[in-house]
Image (cartoon, rainbow, N blue to C red):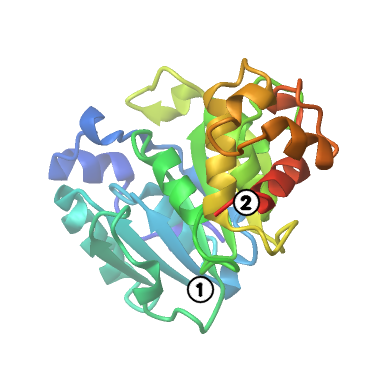
């Protein structure tokens, strides 16, 4: 699809005309390169058959790319009211395929989205740095199967590495287990800080998370959260020490699960944490 199909004015012009300078307090960093935003849009699975929920569209750079690349329907959630005029212009250009809500994504119930249940919901977003991890944890901690089919999200490289980290690495932790227990996660490509306006101090990565069947369906997310919090909250300690707050006799429990009490949390597999969560006393 050619750029000529986008009849909207250049993004820089929209930002200047409407006075939409990025606000650091809201973690806003714009992607101005249309070729890059279209590359991100093309990474969204089954784009044309999906309802895409975009978080924090800002002036609409990625929004326009998603629509140009053929998204079936895009619904944007934007907290900053300043962007409403820019989003209204996009809605006027794509009246049947784009809508938006001025709302806080951390409090928005996605199940209220129009068209929910009729087609897969896929999240695509350049997540604000200040709420990106919070949103991700909330999405991954909900009921399963989730209301979304996939996440294609831009995050700080450090967070992305934690999501895909494997046991035995320094990045492996609570976020790794939460993401990989019930989903397949990978980094699609990296994006340099120079691609953003204003330029952040960190590199970003585009991450794909595909919802899948959990490794152990009987484990409750609340129990897994308790175990990982206790273990990684004191990650330098041996498990027999860090789990004392959860088990009256952690050493016996660990040995019964074929887990060495002297091990440290980063040495355990996701399955090990699931086994411990399953044994939690209630």
Q: Give the number of the mark in front: 1 or 2.
A: 2
Q: Is residue 237 visible?
A: yes
- Residue 231 rendering spot, x and y as whole percentages: 60, 30
Q: As drawn, is 18 to the left or to the right of 231?
A: left
Q: Residue at x 32, y 76 (%)?
A: 95
Q: Nearer the viewer, residue 218 or 131?
A: 218
Up-down relation of residue 269 to residue 72 (above or below): above
Residue carrying label 1: 72
Relative to 272, is 235 above or below? above
Badge 1 crowding class, 10 Å Cα cut-off, few under 14, some 14 to 19, many 20 or more, is some
As rendered, which of 217 and 97 lies closer to the eye?
Answer: 217
Q: Nearer the viewer, residue 45 or 96?
A: 45
Quarter placement of the C terminus: bottom right
Above or below — where is 11 with respect to 120? above
Quadrant position of the N terminus in the picture? bottom right
Q: Position of residue 262 (x, y in %)?
A: 76, 20
Q: Earlier in the sequence, mark 1 or mark 2?
A: 1
Mark 2 — residue?
209
Asked which secondary structure carries label 1, the reply is loop
Horizontal arrangement in the rendering, residue 227 relative to residue 266 (left or right): left
Crowding at mark 2 (Cα within 10 Å: few <14, some 14-19, many 20+): many
Q: CA distance from mark 1 to mark 2?
A: 20 Å
Q: Is residue 78 left or right of residue 16?
A: right
Residue 165: tell me if it is visible.
no
User: Which residue occupies 45% across, 58% down?
Assistant: 4
């Amino acid at each position: 699809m050619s750029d000529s199909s986008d009849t909207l004015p250049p993004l820089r012009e929209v930002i200047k005309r409407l006075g939409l300078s990025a606000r650091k307090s809201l973690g806003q960093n714009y992607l101005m390169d249309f070729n890059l935003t279209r590359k991100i849009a093309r990474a969204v699975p089954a784009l044309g058959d999906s309802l895409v929920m975009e978080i924090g569209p800002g002036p609409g750079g990625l929004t326009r790319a998603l629509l140009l690349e053929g998204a079936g329907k895009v619904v944007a959630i934007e907290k900053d009211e300043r962007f409403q005029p820019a989003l209204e212009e996009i809605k006027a250009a794509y009246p049947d395929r784009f809508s938006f809500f001025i709302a806080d994504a951390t409090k928005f119930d996605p199940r209220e989205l129009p068209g929910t249940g009729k087609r897969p919901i896929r999240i695509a977003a350049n997540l604000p740095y200040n709420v990106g991890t919070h949103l991700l944890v909330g999405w991954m901690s909900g009921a399963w199967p989730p209301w979304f089919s996939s996440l294609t999200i831009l995050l700080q490289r450090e967070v992305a590495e934690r999501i895909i980290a494997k046991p035995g690495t320094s990045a492996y932790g609570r976020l790794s287990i939460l993401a990989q227990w019930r989903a397949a996660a990978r980094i699609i490509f990296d994006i340099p800080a120079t691609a953003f306006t204003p330029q952040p101090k960190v590199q970003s990565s585009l991450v794909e998370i595909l919802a899948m069947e959990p490794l152990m369906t009987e484990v409750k997310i609340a129990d897994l959260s308790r175990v990982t919090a206790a273990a990684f909250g004191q990650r330098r300690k041996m498990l027999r020490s860090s789990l004392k707050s959860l088990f009256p006799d952690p050493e016996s429990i660990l040995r019964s699960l074929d887990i060495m009490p002297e091990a440290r949390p980063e040495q355990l597999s996701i399955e090990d944490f699931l086994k411990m969560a399953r044994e939690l006393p209630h």
